[in-house]
Image (spheres, grey):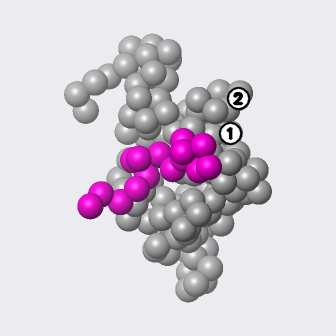
């Protein structure tokens, strides 16, 4: 790691910039939310997860709340327990893609499918917001699209 933020405020600024201002799970933009997004522990503190920036993710309150202390979930296709998506170790586009109208996230892998269900990443509010934002051409975020 090349950068070690010295304060909580500096850490938060770093996380927001690293996440392009979006929840690292559902890709909701912080700039269109009244609530401040959370600093999420990928390995929860309950499992001795550290405050190191390599264990932190920028997360909307819904994803943070639904993830809670989960580290695994069931893939609905195989019924097998798999690890949740880890935004520090994995690429979002390797596990998720948008539906044709950009309102829903589709799981591309067991990890993607399990994480969508566990974090309820297609909550009604998010689907409605994505549909409206897509019409305004402020969704989806560029970094959530596959690179050509
Ligand atoms: Zn989210």
Write the start and end of the magenta stretch as one range: 134-148
* Disc ID at residue 35: 2
Q: Is residue 141 magenta?
A: yes
Q: Is residue 63 visible?
A: no
Q: Residue at x 63, y 59 (%)?
A: 103
Q: Residues within 10 Å of mark 2 (few under 14, many from 20)?
A: few
Residue 143 drawn at (x, y percent): 39, 47
- Quadrant for residue 32, please give it: top right
At horizontal 71% and vertical 27% (from top left) the residue drawn is 34
Q: What residue does disc 1 label?
A: 61
Please tell me which residue lies in front, 11 or 109: 109
CB under 8 Å between discs 1 and 2: yes
> Label for residue 105?
none
Name the quadrant of the N terminus.
top left
Q: Is mark 1 within 8 Å of ligand 1?
A: yes
Q: Position of residue 142 (x, y in %)?
A: 41, 47
Q: Is residue 147 magenta?
A: yes
Secondary-structure class at tag 2: loop
């Amino acid at each position: 790691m090349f950068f070690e933020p010295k304060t909580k405020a500096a850490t938060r600024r770093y996380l927001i910039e690293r996440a392009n201002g979006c929840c690292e799970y559902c890709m909701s933009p912080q700039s269109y939310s009244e609530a401040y997004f959370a600093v999420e522990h990928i390995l929860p503190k309950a499992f001795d997860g550290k405050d190191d920036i390599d264990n932190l993710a920028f997360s909307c309150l819904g994803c943070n709340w639904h993830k809670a202390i989960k580290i695994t979930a069931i893939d609905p296709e195989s019924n097998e327990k798999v690890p949740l998506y880890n935004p520090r170790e994995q690429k979002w586009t390797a596990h998720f893609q948008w539906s044709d109208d950009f309102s829903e996230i589709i799981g591309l892998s067991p990890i993607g499918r399990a994480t969508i269900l566990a974090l309820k990443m297609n909550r009604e509010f998010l689907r409605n917001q994505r549909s409206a934002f897509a019409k305004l051409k402020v969704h989806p975020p560029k970094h959530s699209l596959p690179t050509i």
